[in-house]
């Protein structure tokens, strides 16, 4: 995939990837409870946030916007990280932070759930 040069298109690509990964894991965009937006130029904030509004609509996750010195590749202008909480399952098994899932933490949660049975 070729990375678009424009920040709006990059933001839309980020959300398309997020939606695909969430879906593959059994989550929906409505399950997003936290979002962190990393941008390399503060002038791009309004464009990124406009796409966020279009994409998320009524979904209102806790959000942080950070301006960083750079991302993995120089042509990258935006990166988005989300945490999703499945809305229909017990709270003990719901959290799945994309890119930062801890196997040890999940094992501990599952063990704790089994102890309750």
Image (cartoon, grey):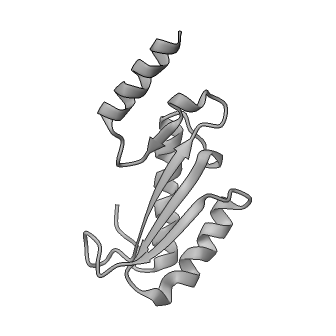
The picture places residue 94, in percent across and down from the top left corner, at 54, 34
Q: Nearer the viewer, residue 109 or 9?
A: 109
Q: Nearer the viewer, residue 4 or 34?
A: 34
Hey, which quadrant is residue 68 in on the image?
A: bottom left
Hey, which quadrant is residue 85 in on the image?
A: top right
Q: Nearer the viewer, residue 116 or 70?
A: 116
Q: Image check: 95 left or right of 87?
A: left
Q: Nearer the viewer, residue 73 or 58?
A: 58
Q: Image check: 103 left or right of 55?
A: left
Q: Residue at x 37, y 81 (%)?
A: 40
The quadrant the N terminus occupies is bottom left
In the image, residue 94 sits, relative to residue 77, either above or below, namely above
In the image, residue 39 sits, relative to residue 37, either above or below, namely below
Q: Residue at x 56, y 38 (%)?
A: 27
In the image, residue 92 sits, relative to residue 112, either above or below, namely below
The picture places residue 34, in percent across and down from the top left corner, at 54, 56
In the orientation shown, which residue stands out farthest toward the bottom?
43
Q: Residue at x 61, y 58 (%)?
A: 61
Instruction: Give the total number of marks visible in the rendering.
Output: 0
The picture places residue 47, in percent across and down from the top left corner, at 56, 81
In the image, residue 88 sits, relative to residue 113, either above or below, namely below
The picture places residue 89, in percent across and down from the top left corner, at 62, 28
In the orientation shown, which residue stands out farthest toward the top?
117
């Amino acid at each position: 995939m070729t990375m678009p040069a424009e920040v709006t298109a990059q933001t839309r690509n980020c959300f398309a990837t997020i939606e695909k990964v969430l879906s593959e894991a059994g989550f929906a965009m409505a399950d997003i409870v936290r979002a962190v937006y990393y941008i390399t130029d503060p002038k791009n904030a309004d464009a990124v946030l406009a796409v966020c509004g279009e994409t998320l609509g009524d979904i209102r996750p806790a959000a942080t916007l950070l301006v960083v010195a750079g991302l993995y590749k120089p042509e990258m202008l935006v990166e988005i990280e989300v945490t999703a909480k499945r809305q229909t399952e017990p709270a003990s098994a719901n959290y799945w932070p994309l890119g930062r899932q801890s196997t040890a933490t999940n094992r501990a949660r599952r063990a704790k759930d089994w102890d309750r049975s």
